[in-house]
Each structure stands twice: as C-alpha cells, then as structure tokens.
Image (cartoon, grey):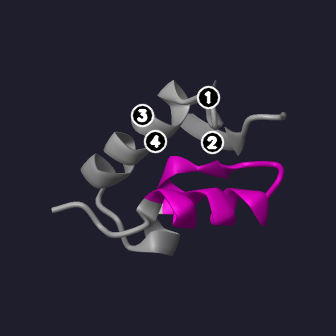
Amino acid sequence: MEMPDIKSQIIELLANNPDGLTMHKIAVALGLTTYMLIRELSTLEAKGEIQIITVGASKLVKLTQH
C-alpha cells in the first residue's frame, strides 16, 4: 500500500537537509520500512530529482542540484 504524498515528504525532508541524509535516517524520520523507502527513492532517482551516493556502508540521499 502506497502512502499518500510520500515523495513530497521525502523531497521536503531533503530540502531541509541540504547536505543529504542516509536512507536509514529518512526511513526513521518518515516511519517507513526499508522496502517502501527504496521503492520511493528509486522513482525519484529515475526522475532525476535526487541522487543516491554510496559513502562507505551507507547510502547518502541528496536533492539533485537544478
């Protein structure tokens, strides 16, 4: 079941954290499972709205600079 407006919530959260957030921090902040978060992030990344950067064992998510 898809949460309403979750993509907007992710974008807003990242806009308030310009240095980016780890996937774990985003999931905790929005109360999402890892599966739900990855599905939403994949869509946003495909649209070019975010970038996902591997930093060590973590993945950092940032808004794409327009």
Instruction: Write the residue at 29% across / 60% down.
Output: 33
Q: CA distance from mark 3 to mark 4?
A: 4 Å
Mark 3 and mark 4 in contact? Answer it, CB < 8 Å: yes
> In the image, residue 23 lies at what x, y percent?
51, 49
**Which image quarter is the N terminus in?**
bottom left
Q: Are marks 2 and 4 in contact (CB under 8 Å)?
A: yes
Q: Which mark is residue 61?
A: 2
Instruction: Locate the C terminus by quadrant.
Output: top right
- Write down the residue under mark 3: 42
Q: According to the image, label 1 marks what residue?
A: 48
Name the chief secondary structure element in magenta: helix
Q: Is residue 30 left or right of residue 61?
A: left
Magenta span of residues = 7-26
Q: CA distance from mark 2 to mark 4?
A: 9 Å
Q: Secondary structure at mark 3?
A: helix
How far apart in space, not on screen, are marks 1 and 4 (Cα)? Answer: 10 Å
> How many residues crowd mark 4 within 10 Å: few (<14), some (14–19), many (20+)?
many
Residue type at mark 3: give it: Ser
> Which amino acid type is marked by label 2?
Val
Q: Earlier in the sequence, mark 3 or mark 1?
A: 3
Q: Which residue is mark 4?
A: 41
Neighbor class of circle 3 (other Cα within 10 Å; few <14, some 14-19, many 20+) is some
Q: CA distance from mark 1 to mark 2?
A: 12 Å
Q: Earlier in the sequence, mark 2 or mark 4?
A: 4
Q: Secondary structure at mark 2?
A: strand
Give the secondary structure at mark 4.
helix
Q: Position of residue 3 (x, y in %)?
A: 30, 67
Which element type, helix, strand or loop, lies under badge 1?
loop
Q: Which of labels 1 and 4 is toward the front?
A: 1
Snapshot quadrant of residue 48: top right
Identify which residue is drawn at 66% across, 65% down.
12
Picture layout, residue 56 above or below residue 12:
above
